[in-house]
Amino acid sequence: MILALGYAVLAIVLILVCVDATSLYLAQKRLDATADAAALAAADSFTLVVKDGEPAAILTSDGVHTEATSLLSAIDDAAAIASATTPDGVSARVTVTTTWHPPVSTLFVPEGVVLESTATSRTVLR
């Protein structure tokens, strides 16, 4: 009887930890998608200029940050922008962060984990 009770407690704890692990995985994937969307929107914030008779799309860090911020406010996500810059003038790199909290609290899972995701999108004018 006591052995069966021990196995039942172990099975319940295992199920609860699996629920929390699945929630953490899905939160990270959701944050990855948010970072991808913000980087893609930011890559479209280019300014069209003519250099040596050829058109060129130039990104600025201010434009990248503005577009990424407006996208995050539009989707009403809990994510916050950690950085939004352009390293080379044609790519937008956006890093977003959020804090994950487990749906079921157990002794084996921390109360909150800071998640971070970085995405880069490139603008190409041909």
Image (spheres, rainbow, N blue to C red):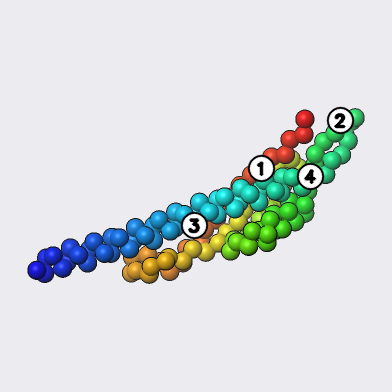
Q: Where is the C terminus found, in terms of image quarters?
A: top right
- At label 1, the amino acid type is Ser
Q: Which residue is mark 1?
A: 121
Q: Which residue is mark 4?
A: 46
Total numbered circles = 4
Q: Which residue is mark 2?
A: 54
- Percent x, y for residue 45? 77, 47
Q: Residue at x 53, y 54 (%)?
A: 30
Q: Which residue is mark 3?
A: 27
* Dot 3 or dot 2, earlier in sequence: 3
Q: Residue at x 63, y 62 (%)?
A: 76
Mark 3 surroundings within 10 Å by alpha-carbon count, few (fewer than 14), some (14 through 19), many (20 or more):
some
- Percent x, y for residue 83? 66, 56
- At label 4, the amino acid type is Phe
Q: What is the CA distance from the residue labelled 2 to the residue labelled 4?
A: 15 Å
Disc 4 is placed on an element classified as loop
- Percent x, y for residue 42? 71, 49
* Dot 3 or dot 4, earlier in sequence: 3
Q: What is the CA distance from the residue labelled 1 to the residue labelled 4?
A: 12 Å
Q: Is residue 12 left or right of residue 19?
A: left
- At label 3, the amino acid type is Ala
Q: What is the CA distance from the residue labelled 3 to the residue labelled 2?
A: 43 Å
**Residue 98, image quadrant:** bottom right
Mark 4 surroundings within 10 Å by alpha-carbon count, few (fewer than 14), some (14 through 19), many (20 or more):
many
